[in-house]
Amino acid sequence: MVSKKKLATPGLTKMSKFVSRLKSNSKIELCGMDTASNLMDSWRWIDFIDPKTGLPCLMLEWLFGCRGMLTGRFVKIEADPGIGKSSYMFLQYGMGQQTSGAYAIHFESEGAPQPPDYIAAMGCNPDDLGILQPRSIEECMSRVEELTYEMRKDDPDKKYPIILGVDSVSGLGSKNDDELDLPLEKRTVLELGGGGAGLAGHARTLSKWFRDRGCLWLQEFDVLMFATAQLKDNIVIGGMPGVQLPADQKKKTIADAVMNFNASYRLRMNSSPLYNKETKTDLGELVKIKVIKNKVSPKNREIQIPLIRGQGFNFAEATCDWLRYKSPIIFKDGTKFEIEQRGAWINCPMIREKNFASNQAGKEELMQNLHANTDMVMSLREGLRIRGFGFDFEKTYVPSKEELEDLTGGVDAVEG
């Protein structure tokens, strides 16, 4: 079976002229309208790096399929309690602080904020991180807006992006919950939230906020917003007690549908214990992150990162192992990038003719050597189809090998 090659859409010359004419007319408000080909020109990235070394983090770039997190977006992180949601948020704050001088504010709902040394271990500067403890979902969303307006008074030119994290939405109550204790005739419908107590009121609060101003507000103020949500077992949506639920309804989060719909990215996290096999000591957790929604690049990618207690995420070693697993990676000119395991040593022929020790120090040395060659790193990014660097594939659609296999049933031949 042979499939026709998908062709790139030709330039919309008439539409380009039309948009240009409207932009020159001061009486017409476009509300951000532009041609699709120009949209990425205004995108603002918060680059992925390893805050400990300052090196780019290829592992995260591949996970999300782009050079960093985009401002003006909403990210939902879902996991069981104690998995590493907060740790990832502190990591993101640290990346923003180091790469773009971002403002960062953490909304803590669980009553016991992490100590400064823990936050610093994730690569985040605790002196440059604001912490707020809202008492309800209504107060949280109100403070999100108020603080953003105040920060933009200090930075009217939007030189610095804003990163806001709500940890966690599941831990916030609702003002509407208090009405359950009132007589029916004294219960009111709150303007923010739309009425109704409990889980329904919680969801309505978020739904109303996103519907009325959320998405445009995030884009207008260059805000990257994170919200974590704890997975809950067997929240029955309809049906009768005792009825077996479908598999996809056994794990839910509070305001699940609202956050899922508005999120540009959804992350699912879990972890397993991490031990030193020789000393049999507990080192921390092996955190697994899977992207289950991605509006920019392919979804369903997954990585594993060691989260070492007291030291934070170990990206240098994890990225080296991940590149070895991904090998070979084909460059545009057809050459192959490989990392090979040879007993107690690892080797990357493209870097130099030297073996590196197959331990943390050796893998960190290999990564330092790799990132010293900027051209090689850019070729790796192009081979991994990382967006945000202006590669040719971002402008003209070229199907990947995996897409060709899906289209042709395993036959790589393409017409045209």
Image (spheres, rainbow, N blue to C red):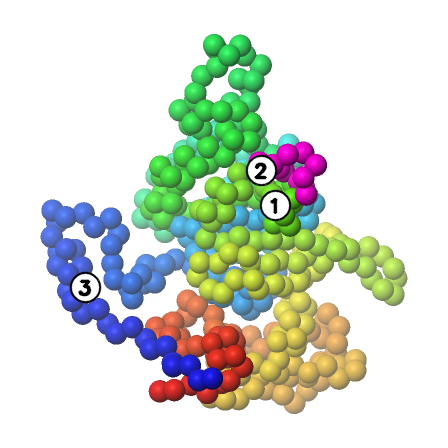
Residue linked to disc 3: 15
Q: Which mark is residue 249?
A: 1
Amino acid identity at mark 3: Met
Q: Are marks 1 and 2 in contact (CB under 8 Å)?
A: yes
Crowd tier of the residue under label 1, counting other residues whose Cα lies within 10 Å: few below 14, some 14–19, many 20 or above: some
Front of the two marks 3 and 2: 2
Q: Closer to the N terminus: mark 3 or mark 2?
A: 3
Of the two numbered discs 1 and 2 on the same chain, state the one appearing first in sequence: 2
Residue 364 falls in image quadrant: bottom right
| Picture residue at 57% right of the left edge, 44% below the top | 228
Q: Is residue 280 visible?
A: yes
Q: Name the element at disc 2.
A: loop
Q: Tell me the magenta residue range.
A: 233-244
Q: Neighbour class for label 2 at 10 Å: few (<14), some, many (≥20)?
A: few
Q: Quickly name the residue at label 2.
A: 237
- The amino acid type of the residue labelled 1 equals Gln
